[in-house]
Image (tube, rainbow, N blue to C red):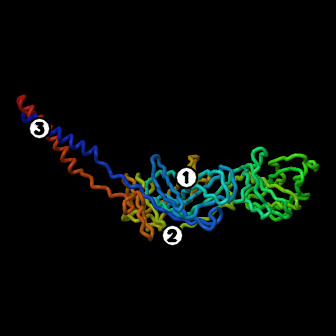
Amino acid sequence: MSRWRKAWIAASVGVAASAALVGTFSIPSQAEASLVANYRCTGGIAGAGVELEARMTPQVEAGGLMNVRWDMSYKTGGREFGSPGFFPAGSSLDLEGVVDISGAWNGQLRPRGGKDQPELVPGQYLDLPEGLSDQGSISRSGKIRFKPGELFVRFTPAEGEVMVNNKTNVEYTSGWEWEYTAEEYGDHLNDVQKTSSQGEIAKLQFIGTQVAYIGRRAPGLGPIRVILDGHTVTDPLVEPGKDRSGKPVIGTETKVVLWESPTKLNYGPHTIEIVNVEDKPAYLDAFRVTTGDVEEPPIYNQATCALQGDPGAIDITVPGSTPTSPTPTGTPTDNPPTDNTPTNTPTSTPTATNTTPHSGSNDGGLGHVVVLPSATGTSSGSATPKTTGPTATKYYKAQVPKTPKGGVDSGEAPDRQAQPYGLMAALVMGGAGGGLLLRRRRAAHAGGVHR
């Protein structure tokens, strides 16, 4: 093989190697950092206590959006939120967390999420929303700290009505007996409760805004007294043996609304009782519980949640250029952001603005929070622009050691590797040298080298 041919091959290999190296070199991607915050909720739908786990994962997304996601779960083997009453399908369990943001940006994000529930009976477990999320707009670089804060739990009942007639939820005194009535009568669920003794009581505790007593009209039935929240509300008494005009009935009529609360009750716990006044037959088919439109989640159902221990925090450094305002001079450090005042004296008083998704003007109509930058002080020193770099995440552990799931053991993104500029330059120069050698060889064959 001729010398010029060898030189051409050497040059080609050198250029190809350098191009391949440049094409494949990249900055290592950072691991997604997260932490777990534990909460204990009491009162309302939490009863004596429910423990929750919230896994917080902050992310900086394309388009200048800062997203925080909370993945919610009941603590394994623990209690769960329970339905406070009888409700049709469509009730909602809503959770809202608070994430405090400090550092280059100050404010709050409030991750929210809800879960629609099936038809409910008292004490039935409620399904948690799979996750909560919220976003904030960012427009400059800096180190941002995310720390979980408060958690709010609300239950909103569905509008509608539910029929209740089983012994699990209705309390009967000993003189009541269950009867199967078959489809020909058309009673609710084809059964009724019957008594023929004076003073027998059927009682239901419920949560709602209205209640009705459902039974039969038939010849020979005795009068019934209705008691609501401890007060007799039937004067005169209910007369199932008579029609609506007060005349004795001659046939049997089923699923009749014999009494209904005349006005809308305040949403909350109530009790209804029916009492058989005489030694005559009486029937109870069901109680109908109605819940009217509830615009806001009732305070009665709200649970209070307290953060257990210190879950730690996550720091994310957002890449980009420093804003035009000059920054204080001094030795840069890798310490986490704090609220301490800079050593230089700012010419203006810094102010921190807290924002929420529902604060009106702060969302700019974008459907997410616009988190405001923290104030920047000025000094006599010259400002040094910060170069653009990759997003770096740092996880700050609580006092109890915990390794964040999905990240490296330290919770920090891997260090940037040294860039092989020397090797790259050598390969490129080798390729260029090979090309020059080729040119000289060709010129030599043509009669000399022109300088």
In the rendered image, which quarter contains the C terminus? top left
Residue at point 63%, 58% (across, down)? 124
Pointer 3 local density, CA inside 10 Å: few below 14, some 14–19, many at least 20? many
Give the residue number, with chain letter if any, for mark 1: 369
In the structure shown, which secondary structural element does the residue marked by tag 1 occupy? strand
Compare marks 2 and 1 and give the one earlier in the sequence: 2
In the displayed structure, 95 sits above or below 5; it is below
Image quadrant assignment for residue 168 = bottom right
In the rendered image, which quarter contains the N terminus? top left
In the structure shown, which secondary structural element does the residue marked by tag 2 occupy? loop
Give the residue number, with chain letter if any, for mark 2: 309
Compare marks 2 and 3 and give the one earlier in the sequence: 3
Pointer 1 local density, CA inside 10 Å: few below 14, some 14–19, many at least 20? many
Kindly identify the amino acid type of the residue bearing the numbered disc 3: Ala
Q: Is residue 349 visible?
A: no
* Mark 2 to mark 1 CA distance (whole Å): 28 Å
Between 179 and 31, which is closer to the camera in this rendering?
A: 179
Kindly identify the amino acid type of the residue bearing the numbered disc 1: Val
